[in-house]
């Protein structure tokens, strides 16, 4: 069925804003500017924008385990997560599933359940939901399994994480509590610390494992990211392996190295909304990273509503222009993930759109989220 959305504020692929009609047919944008022969929704002054693409969101973990040790069915958790994402303009989402050496929420059993639940739920979900495997590099026992997943096409994005040494340093040197780990893993404090020290001892075998996994990902067309890089040389090493997305670089020199290499750099949208990192002075200020050119992609991280609001906050605070700001949540993540069919309002692209009322500033109100031509979410103006 052919239909159209008319608006005085349509953000086009070249960054200009037009008073025009976007015509949708067979799940794609069939025309821009011509009058639609089907039904036309006159959205007035509401923004018509490319749908939000979230490359890294793990807030769904709270739907699965809202309190330590309290579990809910994964199909229900994914359904509730889907509704929240669509209500916040997200049309493509990569669920960040951590496959760790830990038992419990991030262990093998839970990872397999989440992975299977996502695959089973996809036909019923409104958002184009994908599997972002956050592989803990010291989880060496999982390598063969991850290689199989890369080969069978069930991983859409592979990120390398190493929280082992950071966790050990923060606990032993900085006095960080193990309460979160204990609640998440079901281990006692002593059991967790024994496991953590054993895991850190695996370091000599980790680089070769990363190299094998990187090659397999590239061979199978899977985008690669590294998480929390804290050294420019480490980013260069990952870049050399074909791992081109830098997730949350921990300091300015590392982010600058990523930019110099031409790598997309991810920061968190919650950081924009809150005005700084949840890590306090140890974290970067994402708005500054955007303003100074060291951040090219924003993600929801742990809070889905922040992603659709962050571009407006950046513009409001004078950190960048609107086309640049919206590109952080649409065009740029699409390119980084190899999604050539979406990310811009352009003839021939997937009709993944968000319609936003932003007359009253921030927060903007999502009026509709269109996924492949369907109104996956729509509310009254």
Image: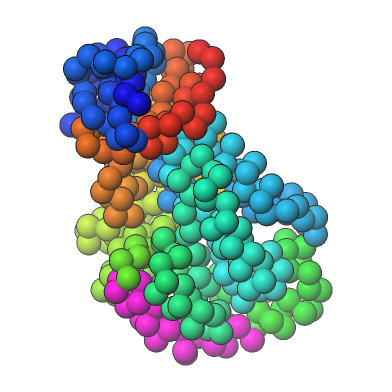
Above or below: residue 297 compared with residue 345: below
Q: Residue at x 45, y 46 (%)?
A: 128
Quarter of the view holding residue 320: top left
Q: Position of residue 45 (x, y in %)?
A: 36, 11
Above or below: residue 330 compared with residue 114: above
SS assignment for the magenta stretch, majority: helix
Q: Is residue 264 visible?
A: no
Q: Is residue 70 magenta?
A: no
Residue nearer the viewer, 243 or 50 = 50
Q: How is the image coloured?
A: rainbow
Residue nearer the viewer, 206 or 51 = 51
Q: Position of residue 170 (x, y in %)?
A: 62, 68
Q: Residue at x 46, y 72 (%)?
A: 149
Residue nearer the viewer, 19 or 253 = 19
Q: Is residue 87 left or right of residue 91?
A: right
Quarter of the view holding residue 29: top left
Residue nearer the viewer, 208 or 278 = 208
Above or below: residue 253 compared with residue 55: below
Q: Position of residue 316 (x, y in %)?
A: 40, 23
Q: Is residue 218 magenta?
A: yes
Q: Is residue 101 left or right of residue 179?
A: left
Above or below: residue 352 compared with residue 182: above
Count the marks: how many? 0
Q: Is residue 196 left or right of residue 217?
A: right
Report the magenta residues as a range: 198-219
Q: Residue at x 31, y 17 (%)?
A: 38
Q: Position of residue 150 (x, y in %)?
A: 41, 72
Q: Is residue 203 visible?
A: yes
Q: Locate the N terminus by quadrant.
A: top left
Q: Is residue 150 left or right of residue 182?
A: left
């Amino acid at each position: 069925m052919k239909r159209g959305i008319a608006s005085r504020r349509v953000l086009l692929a070249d960054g200009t804003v037009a008073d025009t009609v976007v015509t949708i047919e067979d799940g794609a944008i069939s025309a821009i500017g011509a009058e639609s022969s089907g039904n036309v929704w006159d959205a007035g002054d509401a923004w018509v924008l490319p749908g939000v693409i979230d490359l890294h969101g793990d807030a769904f973990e709270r739907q699965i385990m809202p309190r330590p040790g309290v579990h809910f069915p994964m199909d229900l958790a994914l359904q509730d997560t889907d509704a929240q994402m669509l209500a916040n303009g997200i049309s493509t989402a990569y669920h960040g599933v951590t496959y760790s050496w830990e038992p419990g929420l991030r262990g093998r059993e839970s990872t397999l359940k989440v992975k299977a639940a996502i695959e089973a739920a996809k036909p019923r979900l409104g958002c184009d939901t994908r599997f972002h495997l956050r592989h803990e590099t010291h989880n060496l026992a999982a390598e063969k399994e991850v290689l199989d997943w890369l080969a069978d096409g069930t991983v859409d994005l592979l990120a390398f994480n190493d929280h082992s040494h950071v966790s050990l340093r923060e606990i032993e040197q900085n006095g960080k509590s193990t309460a979160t780990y204990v609640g998440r893993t079901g281990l006692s404090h002593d059991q967790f610390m024994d496991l953590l020290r054993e895991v850190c001892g695996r370091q000599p075998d980790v680089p070769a494992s990363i190299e094998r996994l990187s090659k397999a990902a590239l061979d199978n067309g899977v985008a690669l990211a590294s998480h929390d890089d804290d050294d420019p040389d480490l980013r260069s090493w990952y870049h050399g392996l074909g791992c081109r997305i830098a997730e949350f670089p921990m300091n300015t020199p590392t982010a600058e190295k990523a930019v110099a290499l031409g790598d997309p750099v991810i920061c968190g949208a919650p950081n924009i909304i809150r005005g700084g990192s949840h890590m306090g002075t140890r974290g970067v200020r994402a708005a500054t990273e955007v303003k100074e050119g060291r951040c090219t992609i924003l993600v929801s991280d742990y809070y889905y509503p922040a992603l659709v609001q962050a571009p407006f906050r950046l513009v409001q605070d004078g950190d960048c222009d609107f086309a640049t700001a919206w590109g952080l949540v649409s065009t740029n993540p699409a390119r980084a993930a190899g999604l050539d069919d979406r990310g811009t309002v352009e003839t021939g692209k997937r009709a993944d759109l968000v319609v936003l009322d932003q007359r009253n500033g921030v927060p903007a109100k999502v009026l509709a989220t269109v996924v492949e031509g369907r109104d996956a979410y729509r509310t009254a103006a």
